[in-house]
Amino acid sequence: MSDCTQCLHCEDDPGSIERLLPGMNILSSAYGNTRGITAICQHHDMFISPGLACADFRARPGLAAAAAASVPQHR
């Protein structure tokens, strides 16, 4: 099952979050563990704690190929 972190709309890079939320680093850095796994949904324009994907989920490019490559092949 897909979750927000696998979505094209999910921005979870600390540097990008600091650019999208100016002033955030007054309290803490987006690189610190106080942020946890939070991200920004650029589709819904929300600061989120990623969970199960919503109806607007769009897989990140290359995600399906990467998932297929990580599945062990039986011989």
Image: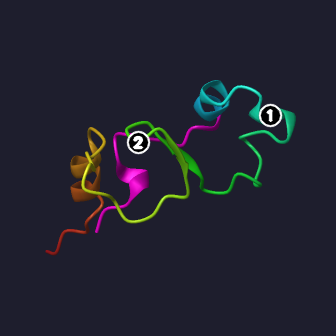
Residue 9, by quadrant, is: top left
Q: Residue at x 55, y 58 (%)?
A: 49
Q: What segment is highlighted magenta in the picture?
A: 1-14
Instruction: Assign a secondary structure to mark 1.
Output: helix
Q: Residues within 10 Å of mark 1 (few under 14, many from 20)?
A: some
In magenta stretch: residue 57: no
Identified by mark 2, the residue type is His
Q: Nearer the viewer, mark 1 or mark 2?
A: 2
Looking at the picture, how far across and down is residue 36, in whole percent? Answer: 67, 57
C-alpha separation, residue under disc 1 versus residue under disc 2: 23 Å
In magenta stretch: residue 8: yes
Above or below, comparing residue 1 to residue 63 in the picture: below
Residue 10, by quadrant, is: top left
Above or below, comparing residue 62 to residue 70 in the picture: above
Please state if 34 lies on the left or on the right of 66 as rendered: right
Q: Which residue is mark 1?
A: 25
Looking at this view, is 71 or 62 the one in front? 62
Please state if 58 lies on the left or on the right of 28 as rendered: left
Identified by mark 1, the residue type is Asn
Q: Which residue is mark 2?
A: 44
Looking at this view, is 68 or 56 the one in front? 56
Looking at the picture, how far across and down is residue 11, in whole percent? Answer: 49, 39
Q: Residue at x 26, y 41 (%)?
A: 62
Say whether disc 1 or disc 2 marks the residue closer to the N-terminus. Answer: 1
Q: Residue at x 41, y 42 (%)?
A: 44
Instruction: Assign a secondary structure to mark 2.
Output: loop
Q: Mark on residue 66?
A: none
